[in-house]
Amino acid sequence: MKIYVPRDAAARALGSDAVAEAIAAEAARRGQTAQIIRNGSRGMVWLEPLVEVERDGVRLAYGPVAPGDATALLDGTLRCHGTVADIPFFARQTRLTFARVGLIDPLSLEDYAAHGGLVGLRRALAMDQAGIVAEVTASGLRGRGGAGFPTGIKWETVRNAPGPQKYIVCNADEGDSGTFADRMLMEGDPFCLIEGMVIAGLATGATKGFVYIRSEYPDAIAVMSDAVRIARDAGVIGASVMGTGPAFDLEIRVGAGAYVCGEETSLLNSLEGKRGIVRAKPPLPALEGVFGKPTVVNNVLSLATVPVILEKGAAHYAGFGLGRSRGTMPLQIAGNVARGGLFETAFGLPLGEIIHDIAGGTASGRPVKAVQVGGPLGAYLPPSQFDTPIGYEEFDRKGALIGHAGIVVHDDSADMLNLARFAMEFCAVESCGKCTPCRIGAVRGVETIDRIAGGDAGAIPLLTDLCETMKDGSLCALGGFTPYPVMSALTHFPDDFAPARKAAAQSAAE
Amino acid sequence: MTLIDSLPSDAALCAIIDSQMHLEGPLLPILHALQAAIGHVPEAALPLIAQRLNITRAEVHGVMTFYHDFRETPAGRHVVKICRAEACKAMGADQLADHARARLGVDWHGTTADGAVTLEPIYCLGLCACAPAVMVDGQGQNRLMGRVSPAAFDALLAEVAG
């Protein structure tokens, strides 16, 4: 009997370690041989710890499971969801990038290969560089970190850049609130990311890769470090990829708590051992990246999507999606929601359908007030815009961005002035300090919002003006996009900024 | 974590620094290694690092102070990190933070008088679908908790800090 108990950080945060111990103890008490596999999460966080028991080749799902449920679980009397495919939240997904996450033992290379792993890499090894790049370009894959730049074009630039040493850098500095897809993938299917990086190396002539993981993700760091060791011992990476290809090796690097290092040029400086200060572009990192060498900088999801593109072909991947947003996006549904978690689907699903049908509305049962899409630099959307389909251009037209596709739901108790203030405060804390609009503007932004809260209506045009300056004058997305949450909150929820109301509420409280 | 009790000698510091020198761009790995071994990055290490990397002491200081993770002084026996970011705010992180600060009697970055707990804000643990979230300690022995109510926070504190 195999029993799957997730080791994913979210499952652990909801008690999966204690559940695994209780099941092992109960099995031992009965003299049963139970093989407990610590898999990744299936992504249905509201059901975590979600335990699957495999009997006669069928995996039955139970959850949320508490340590006290171990007896009923082994008796087979605990309430069962059927298989995960019987759960509508899971059944409605199109899982390409996340096909193996939660399904396999994350650190078993055999399990990985048995579920389609390394097929893409073997195909890539038989192709020339231009052929691999053409395949990725044809898939329509765009940078999943938020900017949405076509991955194939970036690779082509690095491929054509002269120089004996090139690098692949994986941006695993997933700092946006409401996003956790990179974390889940690294904890649940680390070999998939490794395979994607190796293919990127083959395509561009790079022989060395770095995975820059934020220090806030100790579980992901541990899994990735083990996976790199296992892949090296098995000859997947090292002096010769799979024993037949060129050299490619990987190193895990740990960030140090700076949000701005998720910006690619800050990340490169940090890798080099410098302050995580943004670099002006040009030169593009593709030409002068880490240590001044041509460098591919891609997000975890971009790189982890490459194996399935090579495995199933560009046309298969490009067959999903909407307009110029091809393929699938792993949405991360978070905050005040009844059913939060990871939902991978083709681009094109309207925001409202995700929030109401899939996520089941708020956890509190109160009406939805606003949804922030794309992390702390993303706009707040009111229910009147919930018909917007998930797509890069579709969101851009609404003055919003999908970013890394984190969707944070707030109920009607949310104070939008408070959230706008937090956006400015966060920008002030995390600004690298290189450009003035961000460094000074964020501090002035907090002060200006405080004046509005204090009843100074004249400060509202000042805030608008400041946001314009930050948007146009900042070097990178931190200062440049902080106006999105601030201005969207001000535009869509003016009542929360109405000084008279604020002042009245204040004097009533005194 | 096995922390070195008294401040280590220059030779011990150099041994830690040298253990990372084979890496490309070794400064962050060096600072992480020092903090993992000692609990903070002692002032005495900075000139040694500067010498090894052939950069100025000011540059080392500049890098170290840029990153929120590196400490100039030791933390409490446990570091409790409460997420302050949006997804957690949507589920009551502000109230949890207020409760924690009152309960511990410290503000952000403060350490309780008995040296048991240092309270830190953190901006996202990737536990946004089970908010609000807390992490106690870091690499190697981290404890995570989701959907943290004030009562659950108190229970967690009692468990880790006795």
Image: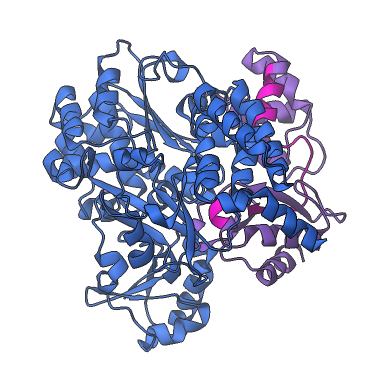
Chain colours: A blue, B purple
> Whole-percent x and y of residue A253?
50, 34
From the viewer's perspective, tell me whether residue A140 is left or right of residue A260.
left
Quadrant of residue A165 in the image? top left
Query: Furthest-right residue in view?
Result: B113
From the viewer's perspective, tell me whether residue B79 is left or right of residue A235.
right
Residue A188 visible within the image: no
Residue beneath the point at 51% across and 78% down: A67
Q: Is A471 covered by the magenta stretch?
A: no
Query: Furthest-top residue in view?
Result: A162
In front: A33, or A175?
A175
Residue A77 visible within the image: yes
Task: State the quadrant of the C terminus of chain A.
Answer: bottom right
Marks counted in the figure total 0
> Whole-percent x and y of residue B104?
80, 59
From the viewer's perspective, tell me whether residue A190 is left or right of residue A474.
left
Residue A139 drawn above or below residue A367: above
From the viewer's perspective, tell me whether residue A246 is left or right of residue A331.
left
In front: B98, or A219?
B98
Q: Is B72 covered by the magenta stretch?
A: yes
> Whole-percent x and y of residue B75?
76, 46
> What's drawn in magenta, residue-wise?
B59-88
Residue A136 drawn above or below residue A99: above
Residue A366 drawn above or below residue A76: above
Residue beneath the point at 40% across and 50% down: A181
> Whole-percent x and y of residue A49?
45, 70
Residue beneath the point at 58% across and 63% down: A413
Task: State the quadrant of the N terminus of chain A.
Answer: bottom left
In front: A401, or A386?
A386
